Amino acid sequence: MKLYASDNKTVAEALGDGGLLVVAQWEAKEGQADKIADILDQFLPEAQRDPGAKLFLIGRDKENKAKFLFFELFRDEAAFKGHQESEYFKKYIAGQALPLLAKRERAQFALL
């Protein structure tokens, strides 16, 4: 089974003890989707190595390539805050990707 988080856990293992689930959807500005995909290719390994990230997945819509989906499971809210304050987040997301977006939505959930 493919590993999705820094501590070599499978998806089932990562979900086992709860956490903060963050789901985000992005839509790229016209002509920027491939550039965002390139940025996310560099960002994702860093996010998956984050010690507070239990699971970190990014998908791209199969039909509308300008849409991206993030499925992120953090140990807790403090881990999520640390992720957003990390150098890799500031570099790739805040510094490069966000200016290329037409739309960004994000929601937080507690696992049942």
Image (cartoon, rainbow, N blue to C red):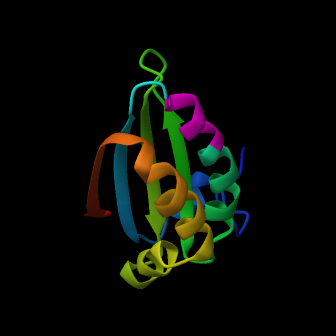
Residue 106: where, in percent of width, then height? 29, 54
Where does the N terminus fall, quadrant-wise? top right
Q: Is residue 37 magenta?
A: yes
Q: Main secondary structure of the magenta part?
A: helix
Residue farthest to the top? Answer: 63
Where does the C terminus fall, quadrant-wise? bottom left
53 left or right of 3 in image = left
1 left or right of 79 in image = right
Residue placed at 63% from the left, 55% from the top? Answer: 43
Up-down: is 19 above or below 14? Answer: below
Is residue 15 at all visible to an observer of this figure? no
Residue 90: where, in percent of width, then height? 53, 69
Of 89 and 56, nearer the camera is: 89
Residue 41: where, in percent of width, then height? 67, 45
Instruction: Please tell me in which quadrant of the rendered image residue 109 appears.
Output: bottom left
Residue farthest to the bottom? Answer: 78
Up-down: is 69 above or below 89? Answer: above
Q: Is residue 58 magenta?
A: no
Of 74 and 24, nearer the camera is: 24
Is residue 62 at all visible to an observer of this figure? yes
Q: Which residues are magenta?
A: 32-38
Residue placed at 54% from the left, 48% from the top? Answer: 57
Instruction: Please tell me in which quadrant of the rendered image residue 111 appears.
Output: bottom left
Residue placed at 59% from the left, 65% from the top? Answer: 91
Up-down: is 62 above or below 49? Answer: above
Residue 47: where, in percent of width, then height? 61, 63
